[in-house]
Every structure is written in C-alpha cells, then in structure tokens.
Image: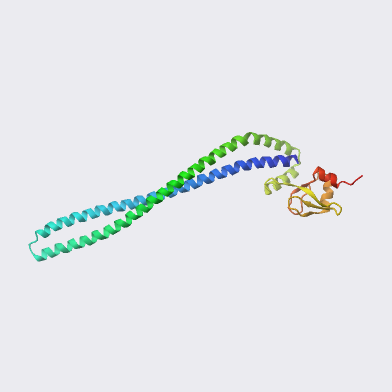
C-alpha cells in the first residue's frame, strides 16, 4: 500500500512534466510546419516574379522592334516592302498581346501568394506566442516538480525494496497497464450474502479471493476481471470481521 500511494504520486508528477513536454513539442512541430509552408510559398512566389521580369524584358524587346519597323515603314520604297513590314508589325503586336495576358496571370499569382505569405506570417506569429507560453510552462513545471519528484522517487525505491521481486514485477506491470492504478479496494455489496466487488471495475469478486485477503493481508490477490491487486480498507475489514 505504501508503494502504491507513492507510485501514484510519482506517476502523477511525471505525467505533468510529460504533458508539458508533449505540448511544447507539438507547438514546435507546428511552427516548423508553418515555416516550411512559408519557405515553399516564397520559392513559388520568387519563380512567378522571375517569370514577370522575363515577360517584361520580352515585351520591351518587341516594343523596340515595332518602333524600328515603323521607321522602316515610313521609308518603304514599294508596296511589297511595305506589306512585309506591316505584316511583321501585326505579328509582333499579337505576340505582345499574348505576353501581356500571360503577365497578368503571373501578376495575379504573385498577388495571391503575397496574401498567402501574409496569412502564414500571422499564423507563425501566433504559434510563436503559444510556443513561448508552452516553454515557460514546462520550465515552471520542472522547477516546481523537480525537487518533490526526487523525494518521491527515493520514497518509492525504499518502499519497493521490502517487496519480493516477483510481487514487485507484478505490481509494476499492472501499474504500467493502468497508469499507476495497480490496486483496487474490495467493496461490500451485501454483507449477509457475502457478496463483494472490485472498486475499480465494479464486478463481483469470488468469495475465495476475499476470504484469502481476510485471512492474510500480505497475500497478493488479483481481481479476476481487471487483474488489479486487491486490498481491504481497515474500516471495511472491521465491518467484515465476525462479531464476537
């Protein structure tokens, strides 16, 4: 019973620390995911901006060529030369129009990616705030729990030292399975009918199990249903004892 009580306290304090660590790790992981998302968004945005720059260079080149052709048109010596120059100008104008349409698409994409970047930044800032709070909480938990946990672990070691290895192994296995709730009290359902139950799973216990515990409080008796180690409270034992 001493081991059971101390073990539950140790597990409770460890659980507090583990929960704080898990929460901080989760915030850190989510922040890294946001940062990765931001990196990918920036890469795509840069590529669209490069595309816009390339399109502007090509449009400028077309404009220069058109200006040059217009000068040649004014100096054309015959209809054939004039028609050829005019056809090239019209072709370049169509090409320029297509490039402008493509540039609008690229600029729209850049604008959308800018909005996405702004949204990502807001989420990153919020997540950083939460992460800092989580880190501060973990630091506080470690500060508050550390000394007391060391004391309890020492008490647990002392309590475990007097228990036979076989019984201690059984206790540890059950405690791991039930997160520290390795033991369960016997409850009286009907004293006259000698009906008893496990306080943890509420199922009826065999009379033999209860009789064994009444005869020997040091015996290791487990619930046939949930497998927890049974014990009888002092008040319950007094109630169950035969009246003199």
In the image, taking residue 39 as reference, residue 233 lies left or right, namely right
Q: In front: 135, or 43?
A: 135
Q: In front: 168, or 99?
A: 99
The image's colouring method is rainbow
Residue at the spot x=8%, y=64% of the render?
Answer: 78
Residue at the spot x=31%, y=51% of the render?
Answer: 50
Residue 217 visible in the picture: no
Q: In front: 206, or 16?
A: 16
Image position, residue 17 (x, y; %): 60, 41
Image position, residue 55 (x, y; %): 27, 54
**Would you identify the image quadrant in which residue 99 lies?**
bottom left
In the image, taking residue 32 as reference, residue 213 lies left or right, namely right
Residue at the spot x=85%, y=44% of the render?
Answer: 238
Image position, residue 16 (x, y; %): 62, 42
Q: Residue furthest right?
A: 244
**Would you identify the image quadrant in which residue 149 lies?**
top right
Image position, residue 205 (x, y; %): 79, 53
**Compared to 152, does 89 lie above or below?**
below
In the image, taking residue 22 as reference, residue 36 lies left or right, namely left
**Would you identify the image quadrant in which residue 6 lies?**
top right
Residue at the spot x=67%, y=40% of the render?
Answer: 10
The quadrant in which the C terminus is found is top right
The quadrant in which the N terminus is found is top right
Residue 133 visible in the picture: yes
Total marks in image: 0
């Amino acid at each position: 019973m001493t081991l059971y009580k101390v073990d539950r306290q140790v597990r409770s304090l460890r659980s507090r620390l583990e929960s704080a660590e898990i929460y901080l790790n989760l915030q850190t992981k989510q922040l890294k995911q946001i940062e990765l998302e931001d990196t990918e968004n920036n890469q795509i945005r840069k590529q669209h901006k490069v595309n816009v720059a390339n399109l502007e260079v090509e449009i400028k080149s077309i404009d220069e060529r058109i200006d040059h052709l217009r000068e040649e048109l004014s100096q054309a010596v015959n209809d054939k030369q004039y028609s050829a120059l005019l056809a090239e100008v019209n072709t370049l104008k169509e090409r320029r129009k297509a490039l402008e349409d493509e540039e609008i698409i690229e600029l729209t994409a850049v604008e959308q990616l800018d909005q996405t970047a702004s949204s990502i930044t807001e989420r990153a800032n919020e997540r950083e705030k939460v992460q800092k709070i989580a880190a501060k909480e973990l630091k506080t938990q470690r500060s508050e729990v550390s000394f007391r946990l060391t004391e309890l672990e020492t008490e647990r070691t002392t309590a475990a030292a007097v228990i036979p290895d076989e019984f201690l192994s059984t206790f540890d296995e059950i405690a791991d399975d039930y997160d520290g709730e390795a033991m369960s009290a016997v409850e009286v359902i009907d004293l006259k009918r000698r009906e008893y139950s496990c306080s943890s799973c509420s199922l009826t216990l065999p009379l033999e199990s209860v009789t064994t515990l009444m005869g020997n409080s040091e015996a290791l008796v487990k619930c046939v249903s949930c497998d927890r180690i049974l014990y009888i409270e002092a008040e319950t034992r007094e109630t169950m004892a035969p009246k003199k």
